[in-house]
Image (cartoon, rainbow, N blue to C red):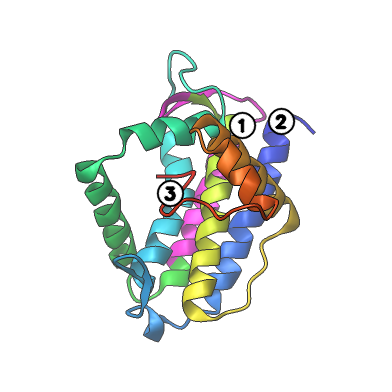
Amino acid sequence: MTGLEETRATYAEASAAFLALAARLPVERYAEPALGNWDLRSLVGHTARSLITVTTYLSTRADAVETEDAADYFATVSRLVHGTVRDQVHLRGVEAGIALGDEPMTVLANARDEAEMALDLLEGTDPVVTTAAGGMRVSDYLPTRTFELTVHSLDIARATGIDFVPPAEALADTLALASASALRQGYGVEVLLALTGRQPLPEGASVVP
């Protein structure tokens, strides 16, 4: 398979796992606390943006590659995120949760189908599209969405007590991207020491904004 085919297959697995997890979450629980100031509705809505942004971004074209890979994406976005932008991210999550309405699974399934259709329309090409971190190849952008789907599915599972294990390839790619992102952002030594049981990560350390 090509690089795009591989990243697309892993993204599709992560998307399917997220939808399967969301299907096990009764709408009646959506008002429960989840992550930070988000309730479950907002967290599910924010996670769904990893479907929506694929459709949105793939409809654009950028003149040049500005962000080389997924690790650079998170490094760039982390530099851009500050108080006002962070508030905007929070608000978009709330708005995405509200947009789920009374039949969230229908909305989520449609969002997944639209993302897959946008990928189908590429017909195997790997164009440079406009993202939050600038121009990127689709094959380099998709792993950031797999990452978000995987990590936030785990957030949902932790908040609800629902058993959830990410697909093996999605988990492996997410771990690899987390390590690469940590290295780009200056956390490489700390992460290595934490993974080998030498010391815990510094409080508040994160490889994503």
- Location of mark 1 (residue): 139
| Structural distance between the alpha carbons of marks 1 and 2 | 6 Å
Q: Which of marks 1 and 2 is nearer the N terminus?
A: 2
Image location of residue 18, percent across then percent down: 56, 63
Q: What residue is at 59 percent from the left and 45 percent from the top?
A: 191
Whether residues under marks 2 and 3 lie with C-beta atoms below 8 angstroms apart, the answer is no
Image location of residue 34, percent across then percent down: 39, 72
| Structural distance between the alpha carbons of marks 1 and 3 | 17 Å
Q: In this picture, is 88 found above or below 75? A: below
- Kindly give the residue lying farthest to the top in the view shown: 63
Q: What stretch is highlighted in magenta?
A: 107-135
Q: Residue 129 carries which label?
A: none
Residue 124 in the figure: left or right of residue 134: right
- Secondary structure of residue under mark 2: helix
Name the kind of residue labelled 2 in the image.
Gly
- Secondary structure of residue under mark 1: helix
Name the kind of residue labelled 3 in the image.
Ile
Residue 134 magenta: yes
